[in-house]
Image (cartoon, rainbow, N blue to C red):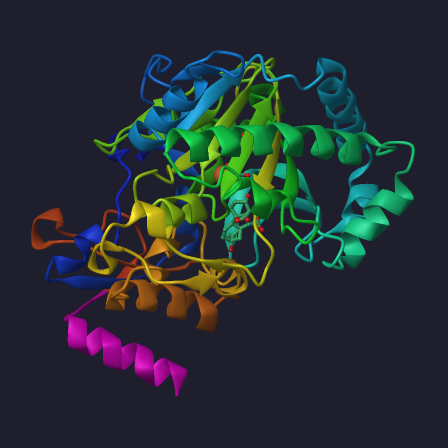
């Protein structure tokens, strides 16, 4: 039974690279059951987390509060944001109308390339989640036949909603990014905002719909056995900043500094700003790209709309000189957004991609990314390691191979050759 063991599982965020110094590496080829098991997490009776800072955009101290929030938690809730509620509900209703269409109609724009309609499969490297979604690029240079088809075939649904919403959210995004630069004491206020405002900015709009508990079929409910169903697995967002708006269904969780998961209360009138990987790099690690995930199966279905603010593809990203006093203190090297994005899209959702920016790329990050690149079609392949005290992996049907660091490096080299 898939979910029977779930409540025993330790529900903590684990950073693989932090574990790299542990001596024993384990290569795990999961069975189908174990792969399914990844869609469940223990149901902890946790109250809603109240520690996410709330920032009023019209408050004179907004810039200080934004900087503190990005440093301490990696996210904050923005109120009095100025985006008309009518624009938000219009797009939300248009999206709901689309999701109500017959599956065969929605599937015409699937799988995303990487834009279009997606159902359960996230990205193209085997990640699964309990959701359906739409992905649009805001960059006219990016050609996506599936997204074009989607807009052409559903003009009555997506009349102007996507464009109007994106324009308004982008304006608010730039305002906040300028307060951020100000708050950090950076002379040029537009150091972040110019990247998102640029007409070649590689930004994305994503609309996710997660089923309510009543929609999940009885077999899955039974298998859950008191566990929670993963809607969108743990990850960090690769861009500069993500701006999330959802209806009043719960589900969003962030990983706190002590490694525990905290449930974030939903608020359909506000926006959550989430620090992305590029902002962590540009601030030389002062801001934290926070790991987050979404649980499906709330009492009502969850509809979220996320704007991912990204720079133009050829923009070089590295720590801002004004935030690094001496060159040696720079934690990250420079990569173009194109380079980082390409590596991101070859990785699995939970991979720690930021290691690619780190000055010494560790063997573990190369390993994770290389394995996924060479076996993207293998749904249930995962590579992990644990220390001796963790003992056996508890997933039934796993084949575990113990190897030391050098053996695994030569194993990967053999795979490549
Ligand atoms: C598994 C994947 C989906 C993703 C591309 C990736 O290979 C790794 C990062 C994922 C992510 C997370 C944030 C955004 O939702 C997203 C659109 C992005 O830019 O990176 C998704 C990608 C996706 O769904 O295609
Ligand atoms: O749907 C949500 O609420 C968040 C999804 C998310 O984190 C993402 O799409 O990157
Ligand atoms: Fe995300």
- Is residue 264 placed above or below 104 in the rendered structure? above
Q: Does the image show residue 217?
A: no
Could you tell me if residue 255 is visible in this image? yes
Which of 335/13 is in front? 335
Q: Which of the pair 370/62 is nearer the observer?
A: 62
Of residues 174 and 296, the one nearer the viewer is 174
| Principal secondary structure, stretch drawn in magenta | helix
In percent of width and height, residue 333 lies at 34, 62
Name which residue lies at 13% across and 59% down.
21
Q: Residue 64 in the image: x percent, y percent?
A: 37, 22
Left or right: 402, with 53 as reference point: left
Residue 229 higher or lower than 134, as above or below: above
* Image quarter of residue 253: top left
Q: Give left or right: position of 391 versus 338.
A: left
7 part of magenta stretch: no
- Above or below for 154 versus 25: above
**Residue 224 position in % (x across, y down):** 43, 29
Which quarter shows the C terminus?
bottom left
Extreme residue in the bottom direction: 417
Which residue in the rendered view is the most extreme toward the left? 389
Question: 288 left or right of 58?
Answer: left
Give residue 26's quadrant in the image: bottom left
The number of discs equals 0
The structure residue drawn at horizontal position 48% and vertical position 41%, both measured from the top left corner, is 188
Per the rendered image, the range of residues in magenta is 401-417
Left or right, 101 with reference to 306:
right
Q: Is residue 403 magenta?
A: yes
Image quarter hosting the N terminus: top left
**Where in the figure is residue 56, as x and y percent of width and height?**
49, 13
């Amino acid at each position: 039974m898939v979910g029977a063991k779930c409540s025993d599982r330790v529900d903590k965020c684990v950073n693989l690279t932090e574990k790299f110094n542990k001596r024993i590496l384990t290569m795990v080829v999961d069975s189908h059951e174990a792969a399914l098991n990844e869609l469940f997490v223990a149901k902890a009776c946790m109250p809603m987390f109240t520690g996410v800072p709330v920032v009023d955009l019209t408050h004179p101290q907004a810039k200080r509060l934004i900087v503190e929030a990005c440093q301490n938690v990696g996210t904050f809730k923005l109120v009095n944001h100025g985006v008309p509620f009518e624009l938000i509900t219009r797009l939300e209703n248009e999206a709901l109308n689309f999701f109500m269409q017959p599956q065969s109609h929605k599937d015409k724009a699937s799988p995303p390339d990487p834009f279009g309609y997606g159902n359960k499969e996230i990205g193209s490297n085997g990640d699964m989640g309990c959701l359906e979604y739409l992905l649009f690029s805001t960059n006219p240079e990016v050609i996506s036949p599936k997204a074009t088809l989607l807009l052409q075939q559903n003009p009555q649904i997506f009349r102007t909603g996507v464009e109007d919403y994106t324009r308004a959210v982008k304006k608010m995004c730039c305002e906040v990014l300028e307060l951020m630069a100000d708050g950090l004491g950076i002379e040029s206020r537009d150091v972040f905002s110019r990247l998102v405002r640029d007409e070649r900015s590689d930004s994305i709009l994503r609309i996710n719909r997660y089923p309510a508990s009543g929609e999940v079929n009885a077999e899955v409910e039974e298998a859950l056995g008191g566990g929670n169903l993963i809607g969108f697995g743990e990850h960090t967002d690769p861009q500069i900043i993500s701006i999330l708006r959802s209806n009043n269904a719960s589900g969003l969780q962030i990983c706190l500094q002590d490694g525990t998961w905290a449930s974030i209360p939903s608020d359909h009138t506000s926006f959550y700003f989430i620090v992305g990987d590029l902002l962590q790099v540009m601030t030389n690690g002062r801001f934290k790209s926070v790991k987050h995930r979404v649980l499906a199966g709330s009492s009502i279905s969850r509809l979220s709309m996320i704007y991912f603010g990204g720079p133009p593809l050829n923009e070089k990203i590295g720590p801002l000189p004004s935030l690094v006093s001496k060159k040696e203190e720079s934690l990250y090297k420079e990569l173009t957004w194109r380079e980082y994005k390409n590596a991101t899209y070859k990785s699995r959702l939970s991979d720690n991609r930021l290691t690619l920016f780190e000055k010494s790329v560790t063997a573990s990050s190369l390993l994770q990314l290389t394995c996924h690149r060479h076996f993207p079609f293998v749904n249930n392949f995962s590579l992990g390691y644990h220390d001796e005290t963790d003992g056996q992996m508890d997933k039934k049907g796993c084949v575990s191979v113990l190897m030391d660091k050098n053996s695994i490096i030569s194993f990967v080299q053999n795979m490549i050759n």
